[in-house]
Amino acid sequence: MTRRLIIDTDGGIDDAVAIWWAASDPRIDLVGVTTVGGVVSAEDAARNVLLVLEAAGRPDVPVAIGANDRLGPSPELRPADFIHGSDGLGNTVRGRVPAGTPLHGAIPLLDRLIDGMTSIVSLGPLTNLARLALELPRQAAAVDQLVIMGGAAAGGGNALPDGEANIAHDPSAAAVVVGAGWANPPLMIGLDVTHAATLDDSDFALLAEKRTPAAAFLDAPLRFYRPFGATFTAPACPCHDFATVLAFIESSFVTDAPILPLAIATAPGPAWGSTIVDFRAPAFARSGGSEQASPDGFADWRIGLGVDRALFRRRARQLFGD
Ligand code: BDR
Ligand code: CA
């Protein structure tokens, strides 16, 4: 049985890998893509998504431009052009115009597509999904499975000392999404997972052979991405959003994902934009210490902690033509 999926994305390079995979995996029915400002503007992200979908032979997938404005105050972040290029795809698509035209408004497309059997994978700041939860809570509650790339359960960050980029771009939106009334506990794929799912020299060498249309399209962007994308894992290189789509479709990919209370730090200060996981919860549950319940603002999520790196590399190499 195929699984209906909507991707919400900020149009970067690892997003492109994830979208190509989702558009071509026969287990996934990619029914729509919505964009959000993050790596680039929501408009440029839509251009990138359309170019990826057209190169992948899926011009039929509707793409809608979502939010650029943040839901609430957010920390000042350095633009991501040094990782993703000023166009979001490693300066490979500047001036290129897709054949297709994006729709305007993520919420109307989400409203039209969500039907109780549809899941969402979020690969950017959580602004669109927070708006969905606030404006159409019944539709949010009808989402089958929500998987987000964001945060870091063990602490630490990439965009800030304790802030992963997708959360830090719009902490208020992330807090709304964490506390919304989802039907099933959502899955957080943070840096704990994505920094452990990496590509190495041999994978990049295979990519450079351009054996598949995917490799031909993705080689130049991923080569641009690698030097800074690998900052915390060098010489191996993560591909955060690709790992997140795999977490959705490969049941054995995330090897450890306990349900734990999750919250977002929304107040200005050193931890602004960080994820806080209450790792005390299982121990308190075992000892019957219910008076030590997590404070307000926490909600139960599945927190990805372990990952099958070999499977990650196998899937990437499959995409690249192994
Ligand atoms: C996340 O931030 C963006 O730069 C990437 O596309 C990914 O979604 C990683 O922190
Ligand atoms: Ca992204």
Image (tube, rainbow, N blue to C red):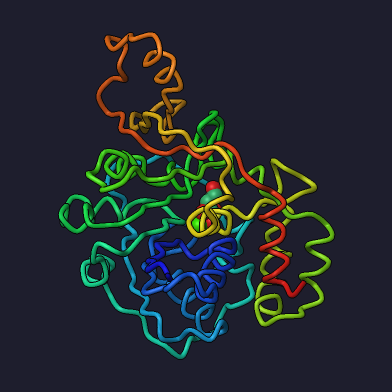
Choose top left, top right, bottom left or bottom right for residue 142.
bottom left
Residue lying at 69% horizontally and 40% vertically, measured from the top left: 232
Q: Position of residue 234 (x, y in %)?
A: 77, 45
- In the picture, measured across the screen, residue 296 lies left or right of residue 91, that is left
Task: State the residue in front, 18 or 11.
Answer: 18
Count up the numbered dots.
0
- Left/right of residue 277 with respect to residue 109 in the rendered view: right
Q: Is residue 315 above or below residue 59?
A: above
Can residue 238 be seen from the camera position used here?
yes
Is residue 154 depicted above or below 12 in this figure?
Answer: above
Which residue sits at x=72%, y=72%? 320
Eyeballing the image, is 159 above or below 267? below
Counting from the top left corner in percent of width and height, residue 50 is at 46, 79
As drawn, which residue projects farthest toward the front? 1
Q: Residue at x 22, y 72 (%)?
A: 112
x and y percentages locating residue 102 in the rendered image: 36, 80
Q: Quadrant of residue 32?
A: bottom left
Quadrant of the image for the N terminus?
bottom left
Snapshot quadrant of residue 283: top left
Where, quadrant-wise, is the C terminus in this rendering? Answer: bottom right
Q: Nearer the viewer, residue 210 or 105?
A: 210
